[in-house]
Amino acid sequence: MSSVSAVNSLLSSTATTTPAIDISSILAASSGTSTPGIDVTAAVTAAIYADNAPERAWQADQTTLTSQTTALTSIQTATEAVATDMQNLNTLTGPLAARTVTSSDSNDLTATAATGTASGTHTVVVNSLATTGSWYSDLATSATATLPTSSLTITTAAGGTATIATGAGTAGNNLNDLATAINGQNLGIYASVVSDSTGSRLAIISQSSGSAADFSITSANYTGTSWTSPDIPTGATLGANSVTLTIGGTPTTITTTSGETYAQLATAINGLDLGVVATAGSDANGTNLTIASSDGVTPFTINEPNFGFTQAVAAANASLTVDGVPIQSSSNTVTGAISGVTLSLLGAAPGTPISLTVASDASQVSTAVNQFVSDYNTAIGLVNTQFNVDSTTNTQGVLGTDPTIVSLQSALEQALNYVNTPATGTTAVSTLSDMGITVNNDGTLSVDTGTLDNALTDHPSDVQSFFEGTSLNGFANSMYNALNSYTSPANGAFEVDLSSIAAENSDLTSQINDFETGYIASQQTILNAEFSQAEIALQQLPQEMAQLNAELGLTPTGNSNG
């Protein structure tokens, strides 16, 4: 086939297969007067661009769908926030049920109230606080000094008991060991060694307060003709205690007061003429007391423990009256005296009435109401934006004609018209405006803080009734139901709308992919082959024209010899 025929064939076939392509324009664009031939790549690109017109329209549709998805998702999130606010205001455990307790004397008594506790005022009189029991021993020279051989018995009010031996080779070898042994008995008490510049002593404290946690300490009696007390540091004194001496079956108790010395105790014993001689002595470890039978033969019995324990505080219950009712509590944290209220006893002011007022927590309610207003404004603002007309393009938002958004705008606005009408009695809060919540010209809400605070302070039950109704059927429930048809994750309008958009977008993607693989790819192959053939034909055309001229005897202009 000649070059001319090839070009004519290409023009003929291309015009048939791609009627939308202007071959003359393609050739003009891809070749110049000074450069013979065709730029195949440019020619094919121009032809394919013309063929891609439907695909570009589909891609534009996808861009619109993406914008719709973004806008719809934002509105969905904002609307769900409003629905969540309504759930928060429509529950017996939410902010409307929160309570605060005010005490007229917070230095002596404070309290907290559980959610939903009945509001009211109560009178409390604290007579005495609950205490923990505590005992301490007389001073010893050190925490590691060996204790005299003896034993002590600890008895709890609950009936627990333990006897611990003391002295060399026993569990109570010294004060440190004795503390460890006591703590290992699990009696509900805790023993520790307290040391200072004067020496060491053992302190034992009940681990809980109340009379049931009280305990006592006794020691094994000594019987013989001579007994020596443990040493106390030189210069130290005795604690409040008592010593009972039994001689010939007759007991005699000698009481010591805190601050006495062994010398004073010896004088007191000797003054009773009991048939024993008491002597205060000292050695390198401190001072002690020795008691011996006067005749060296007659035995006596002494029940004074080897380290003279003194009871510092007896464990006792707290005593109070609540609204005139007497209450005993093992703890200074009292529950059950007022339903839903926990009392914290801080100090005893016997006979002094303290007023406790349980009321709605206005702060939590105010926060919840303002959160609703903020979330509502976000939602209605996003919705209204879709209906604003762009002055440049004279078009609405991408969802301006979406039925879901049109109906949502109406649902949000109509929900605000709720009126609370009690079945009986009257209410000071029947509409949102009674709480200072008003609608602006653009559909958003504003809150008058003063009006809201007054409603929460003066009419808390009416505010609660507005939102909750008589049985969680008030404003909050009404608005939640209005929005649920949009926000329901199962079949809400948002999910249906988004699913429809996603399906349409997916169909367009498939359509584009099919168009690319089923038509554009093959068309590109065909055009590459045909334009390449045409380019070759054009390159051969000058030579063939010269041959034709020669055969016809034609002399090209400019080559004549005449």
Image (cartoon, rainbow, N blue to C red):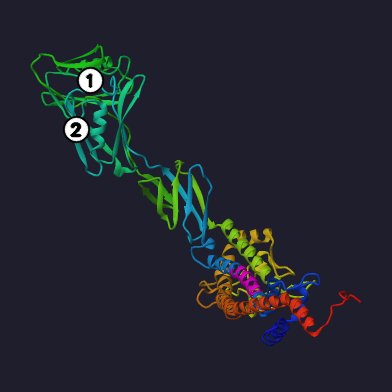
Whether residue 49 is visible here, answered yes or no, is no
Rendered-image quadrant of the C terminus: bottom right
Given residues 26 and 547, the one toward you in this image is 547
Residue at the spot 66% in from the left edge and 86% down from the top edge: 17
Q: Taking 255 as reference, is 323 above or below it? A: below
| Mark number displayed over residue 230 | 1
Q: Give the prevailing secondary structure in the magenta stretch.
A: helix
Q: Taking 363 as reference, is 150 above or below it? A: above
Q: Which residues are magenta?
A: 62-76
**Which is nearer the N-term, disc 2 or disc 1?**
2
Q: Is residue 508 left or right of residue 29?
A: left
The disc labelled 2 sits on which kind of residue? Ile
The disc labelled 1 sits on which kind of residue? Pro
Given residues 474 and 309, the one toward you in this image is 474
Residue at the spot 59% in from the left edge and 72% down from the top edge: 475
Residue 226, image x and y in percent? Answer: 14, 17
Residue 175's quadrant in the figure? top left
Residue carrying label 2: 164
Residue at the spot 60% in from the left edge and 79% down from the top edge: 522
Residue 417, image x and y in percent? Answer: 65, 75
| Mark number displayed over residue 165 | none
Residue 454's quadrant in the figure? bottom right
Residue that sits furthest to the front in the current view: 562
Given residues 12 and 508, the one toward you in this image is 12
